[in-house]
Amino acid sequence: MPDALSTTIPIWCTVLNTVLLPSHPGSSQLFLPPHLLPTTHAQITALVPQFVASFKALHLQDLPKITKPLRPFWVTQDSALGPETHALPPEPSPEAQDPTTPGTIYASYRPVICLTASRRNTSSSEIDSNGYIQGAADDTENWAHGLTPAAFWANRDLLLSTPEPELPGLIASLSLSPSPAAQATPASAPDNNPTTRLTPQISVCALPPPPGAGCCISLTSATTPRDQWAKSAASMEVGLGRHKTASRNLRTALPYICDFASACLQRDPQARVTVACESGKDTSVGAALALSCYLFDDEGQFRVPNETARFTKTLVKMRLARIMTAYPGANPSRQTLQSVNSFLMDWTK
């Protein structure tokens, strides 16, 4: 089972429960899958107060409210699911909660279902048992043939009924066909590619950026020479490549991106900066994070960076947390965040 499901999500559930429901008797309880050793449970439990303190140090505002603690549940190929567990049971009213009634656990907790297609592996050889292999699903561009989650769900029955040797050709044809949602929405519709405001002056979106976006920085999938990036005083197209290559190239591009945005803001301190990338969720969010740290103070006021500027990992974490709160759909990769950290930390040396 991936660590994200077996430990990361349970830790987050406990941290959020402790912060959002501090007076609830079950908030501090850590739930881990049964295959983990008691020593592992004890070690993680001892770290929870530190995680809670780190979360509180972010000083996030307007956090969501919950009425029941979050609790993870794990479903694998070995899980026995009866007819009564194919769907969550209806929640009884508080007056009707009975500890002996089936489904009462959902009346006491908000379930977080951790679903994995891997079989639970108890042998020493993961390959022989067809169990979970760490990192096997990484780098989807190397094995998914361009199939996206949206395309899978839109064509699920067709894909599942197609013989495996024919799948690459089918996926290629689906990749070239516009989705039903794209067909139903005219390309000129104003809401076809909305922007998401991360800070008062920084927004992100998927390519192409909307017209009249103010200072616009497009991160494109075609690698281009640096001297071709600036298209006008308010428009920049930075060719980073795709996937991990784009995330790595972002590191060397950030000084030029920040200088370009700084020049725009020096001409008009109230200008809006829009950063666009292929998904609108990865490198554009990373660049927006760098711009937020590099060009704006804690009050959100534009400042021209100089040799006295200092950036810390705590500052980057706080700005990233605010961005993720404003845009939960953002999904900057680890490589993207490493590029941002490397750029900002090198600046302070």
Image (cartoon, rainbow, N blue to C red):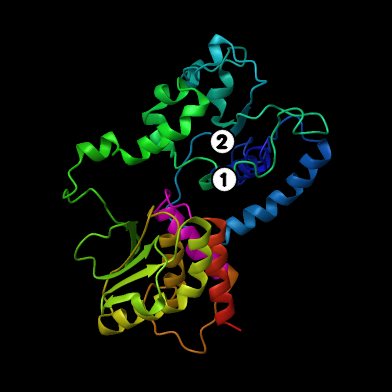
- Is any part of residue 59 visible from this angle? no
Instruction: Measure the alpha-carbon separation of dots 1 and 2.
Output: 8 Å
Task: Locate residue 139 relative to residue 303 in the image: left or right.
Answer: right
In this orientation, which residue lies closer to the viewer: 230 or 210?
230
Residue in front for this viewpoint, 297 or 203:
203
Other-residue count near label 1 (Cα within 10 Å), few / some / many at <14 / 14–19 / ≥20: many
On the question of residue 116 being in view, the answer is yes
Residue 175 at x, y = what percent?
Answer: 37, 40
> Which residue is located at x 48 percent, y 62 percent?
246
Count of numbered circles in the view: 2
Q: Secondary structure at mark 2?
A: strand
Q: x, y percentage for residue 330?
A: 43, 52
The residue shown at (53%, 65%) is 248
The residue under the point 30% across, 79% down is: 265
Q: Mark 2 = which residue?
A: 70
Residue 199 lies left or right of residue 6; in this view the side is left
| Circles 1, 2 touching at the beta carbon (< 8 Å) | yes
In the image, the segment drawn in magenta is 314-332
Instruction: Tell me the quarter of the picture where residue 205 sits.
Output: bottom left
Which residue was labeled with disc 1?
A: 16
Q: Amino acid at mark 2?
A: Leu
- Which quarter of the rendering shows the N terminus? top right
Label of residue 308 in the image: none
Q: Is residue 190 left or right of residue 149?
A: left
- Residue at image location 45% in from the left, 55% down from the top: 324
Q: Which one is in front, 147 or 83?
A: 147
Dot 1: what SS?
A: helix
Question: Residue 232 is drawn in which quadrant?
Answer: bottom left
Q: Earlier in the sequence, mark 1 or mark 2?
A: 1
Q: Amino acid at mark 1?
A: Leu
- The C terminus sits in image quarter: bottom right
Seen from this angle, which residue lies furthest top? Answer: 83
